[in-house]
Amino acid sequence: MKNILLSIVGACAVSALVACQTTDSGSENVSAELGKIAPKPLYRDSIYDGAADPLVMFNHTTQKWNMLYTNRRANAKDVNGVEWVHGTPIGIAESDDGGATWQYKADANIQYPYVKEGELATFWAPDVFYQAEEKRYHMYLTIVPGVFDNWRHPRSIAHFTSSNLLDWQYVSTLKLNTNKVIDADVVALPQGGYRMFYNDEPDGKSVYYADSKDLYTWEDKGKAKLQSRGEGPTTFYWQGYWWLVVDAWKGLAVYRSTDLENWQQQAEHLVQTPGTGKDDGVIGGHPDVVVNNDRAYLFYFTHPGRTAENKGKDNYQTRRSSIQVSELEFVDGWLTTDRNKPTRIDLR
């Protein structure tokens, strides 16, 4: 990770920045170095208005940051049940200012051979791992075989590769614990090889994991040692710990570990208490975390219309979703974030 370079008036040390007394102009300079203030919401999709399950990744081809996301068809008409959550493409947004603002770029071109011509494919929750030695991106994508008005159908995790984050070639469908698995997240292991965390729906939507030596062949290892259930796991290393953040449907559950095997659960959930910003007045869901320049950013999505007064309603306002970002802080050995605090972001 690169260090943040700060220029500050006077003899204050960077490590004592918070305690230092600076001039107003010095404070403004420091704030500018920390990046632009991200808007609320950070991003809304211009096609279906259903951006969810964000994955933020640097594109080495364009030298810009990309966001891949499930694009739920929130504004679709004449759909039954949960058909609007099916037939979903993977949208791609792009940022040229370090993640502060985003513009829709395209839908990912996913070459999946098991979709019949003229039918909509259902793609959910992309996770991408960049293999620098081969300059190749590996995507692990949840696939549902069709468009359905209920949740009772199989789901699998498939492997694709790309050289540009836009065009994806099918490699294989992973053999995991059951035929109803979603939400892959892959991390490189410190001892070599890779680990994938995912959600096993038949087992009460528990988090499972699998290991691989090469990103192609995976061996299922069973249920992760977590104290509760959840979906959309995201794993990262920061501040001397491995972290696993999981959508617990009441905010985000946080776990920490020193070995990626044994996990301690944090008492407090992140983004459980509704925020005050635009489109942020509900719980946050399905996260991604980017560690960059020793700072950690929590990306999550919200359903702004799912408020108490709209309970039980199913319409465009309760379906649409927005992406938000908030910076994580490491306090007394655990993670916290203030979703109402302006987030300055400058991904390098």
Image (tube, rainbow, N blue to C red):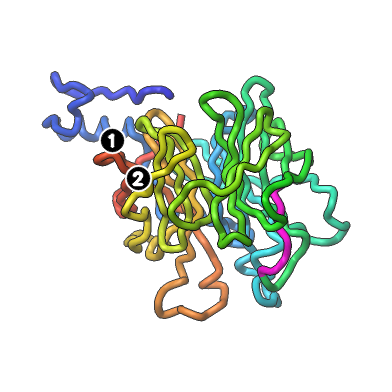
Q: Residues within 10 Å of mark 2 (few under 14, many from 20)?
A: many
Q: Main secondary structure of the magenta part?
A: loop
Q: Is residue 42 visible?
A: no
Q: Is residue 174 visible?
A: yes
Task: From the image, tell me which residue sits under label 1.
Answer: 31
Q: Nearer the viewer, mark 2 or mark 1?
A: 2
Residue 321: where, in percent of width, then height?
52, 62
**Drawn side of residue 95 relative to residue 85, left or right:** left
Q: CA distance from mark 2 to mark 1?
A: 11 Å
Q: Does residue 52 lie above or below 197 as drawn?
A: below
Q: Which residues are magenta?
A: 151-157
Residue 311: where, in percent of width, then height?
46, 79
**Drawn side of residue 91 relative to residue 342, left or right:** right
Q: Residue at x 57, y 56 (%)?
A: 51
Task: From the image, tell me which residue sits under label 2.
Answer: 343
Asked whether residue 255 is drawn in magenta, I would say: no
Q: Residue at x 60, y 32 (%)?
A: 194
Q: What type is the residue that disc 1 sits on?
A: Ser
* Residue 144 figure quarter: bottom right
